[in-house]
Image: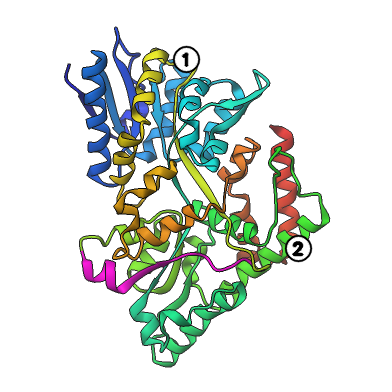
Amino acid sequence: MGLLLNSCTEKSTQKSPPKSQDRDLTIWWSQGFYPEEDQALETAIEQWQQQENLKVNLKFVHEDDLLPLTLKALEDEAPPDILFSVRADFIESPRWAWQGDLLDVSELIEPVKSRYSASALESVQLFNHKANQRAYYAVPIEQQTIHIHYWRDLLAEAGFSETDIPQDWENFWNFWKQVQNRLREKGKEDIYGLGLTYSTQAVDTFYQFEQMLEAYDVEIVDREGNLQVDRPEIRKGIVQTLDWFTRFYREGYVPENAIAWLDADNNASFLNRQVVMTLNPTLSIPGSQRSDPQVYREEMATIPFPKEPDGDPPNYIVGVKHALIFTTSPQPEAAKNFLAFLIQPDRLGKYVKGASGRWFPVMPELWQDPFWNDREDPHVAVAAQQFRAGHTRPSYPVFNPAYARVQAENVWGRAISRILNEGWTAEKAADEAIANIKAIVNDW
């Protein structure tokens, strides 16, 4: 039977579609950044339809619309059979699992458990408060972490080479201040050394700041889900990290409008060469320049984080993007059957590779593909090494679902705003953030 493809516009968020009819399997999937992603999924679906003699209603939805559409569908008791959203892992999935809204998919994970990385498995082992158990409530598909990009030509213009970039923490970050100073001496008054995000609106703000907390060994939530903010050493670490992180802006090494950036604005600032270096939780920045080999391969570079302040290798926070089946999904058995088919390494590998490095494999064996080892690619191969090194951990909502609300409310962005926009001390901003986090967790 033929594959039914639908597009979803903003109007689709106003009304959920009807429940699947007969034996149709309904899949809502985040629209890919590259056509190859969507094509790989379509190919897998076509193969599965022929094998199972079932029809699939596939709906690619823009990520901005997907979660609102899903929330409305859950209210109407008309969810899709399978949902794949690249934002659900840090916004909704932990809450849905806690409430008992997600189907336990352990029977899908167990046969291929040895193929997955430890952090991928840990990321989908969520707690169901209703059932009073922790189990696999999602199926890992791909993953992301934070990357550092810089302009080689601007570095050279400042009189530095790539070998001049320090590997220890403090000297690494201070190096970009030196680059800005040199460029300013050459009359480049509109170029900044660092493209850090400080707004209350951007996901990048808390992603960047929590990566800095990780570097300073400030553990907000332990792996048992216990909040640690009442410990004096944790409060001290939050204060120090807030002061350190905001100092670059206060000293003039970050664009003034960074306090109002949305998630795309650091990308734009970097691509417009307003900043020499920036951080981003995907490879979307270099990916946008793939059609220009000179820019992609020669002028732009990606590098790993420096060693942490204590000299340890960097430990990266990873977001594992996963597929979900709801307990009220009309066709749970067919949904499990399809996902078991999709996550076989040959199919999953083609899908993840279709993202051209925007997302990365969650199965170590897939790293053997030459695509992830191309030394001529100055971005994908370097970023892949961040995952290969094995120093990773899931984001905090995996351990405590209430933390998803901490991120949704951008508590760290608000603390940063207090310092930069209202002149608060780091101590005062930290204490308010701690109080807000405790209130959210206590209200959960």
Magenta extent:
292-308
Q: Is residue 48 visible?
A: yes
- Label ID, residue 328: 1
Q: Amino acid at mark 2?
A: Glu
Residue with the mark numbered 2: 427
Q: Quadrant of the N terminus?
A: top left
Mark 2 residue element: helix
Q: Amino acid at mark 1?
A: Thr
In the displayed structure, 242 sits above or below 384; it is: below
Image location of residue 32, percent across then percent down: 30, 42
Taking the spot 36% from the left edge, 22% from the top edge, the residue there is 16
At x 45%, y 80%, the residue is 163
For the point 49% across and 87% down, the residue is 181
Spot occupied by residue 419 in the image (x, y as percentages of width and height): 65, 65
Residue 110, above or below 21? below
Q: Please tell me how many numbered marks the rendered image carries.
A: 2
Question: Residue 53 appears in which quarter of the rendering?
Answer: top left
The image's colour scheme reads: rainbow
Magenta run includes residue 303: yes
Decide if residue 102 is in sight here: no
The answer to whether 334 appears left or right of 423 in the picture is left
